[in-house]
Amino acid sequence: MDISAENKSNTFQLAFSSTDMDEEFNTNEYSFENSDFDDNQALLLTVYKVGGDTYDEHFPSAVSIYKTSQDVNNNTISGTFTAVLDKAGSMQDEVETPEQINITEGKFTKLKYTEYHY
């Protein structure tokens, strides 16, 4: 499942692996530790928008997403998340970005979702 939010200067994407959304899955923790993509279930990315271009300057070192509830009848999901993203380098010089982004109290509440079957 991917959750995206954006404004005029940033795009934020939170993703976690899940089972079939037709059935409620257990309240779980999904995690990302270091850079071992094979065993990770969660990912958080932030992208900066500068002059019509996009720049991804931070890479996650730890992400935890806690799914707290899901309503399969109304297709909504709620949860909390924490993340640490470290600066991987500067790809632009117009906007100064921090060396580290530390999210301690992220939250999403009753987000509507659509499941696509391919």
Image: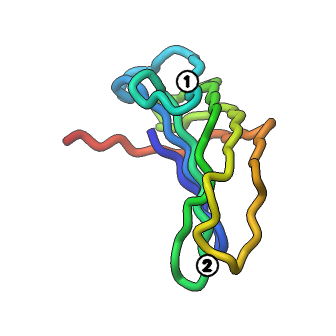
Q: Position of residue 55 (x, y in %)?
A: 55, 67
Horizontal side, residue 14 vs residue 80: left or right = left
User: In what element is the residue under mark 1?
Assistant: strand
Residue at position x 61%, y 78% from top? Answer: 50
Residue at position x 62%, y 74% from top? Answer: 92
Residue sitting at the far front: 89
Of the pair 103 and 36, the residue shown nearer to us: 36
Q: Which mark is residue 76?
A: none
Q: Quadrant of the N terminus?
A: top left
Residue sitting at the far bottom: 51
In which image quadrant can residue 106 be found? top right
Q: Are marks 1 and 2 in contact (CB under 8 Å)?
A: no
Q: CA distance from mark 1 to mark 2?
A: 31 Å
Q: Is residue 32 above or below residue 85?
A: above
- For mark 1, what is the residue? 30
Q: Position of residue 66 (x, y in %)?
A: 63, 25
User: In what element is the residue under mark 2?
Assistant: strand
Q: Quadrant of the C terminus?
A: top left
How many C-alpha atoms fall within 10 Å of the one at disc 2: few (<14), some, or many (≥20)?
some
In which image quadrant can residue 23 be found? top left
Horizontal side, residue 91 vs residue 117: left or right = right
Q: Which mark is residue 50?
A: 2
Q: Which colour assignment does the render follow?
A: rainbow
Horizontal side, residue 110 vs residue 117: left or right = right
Q: Is residue 21 above or below residue 10?
A: above
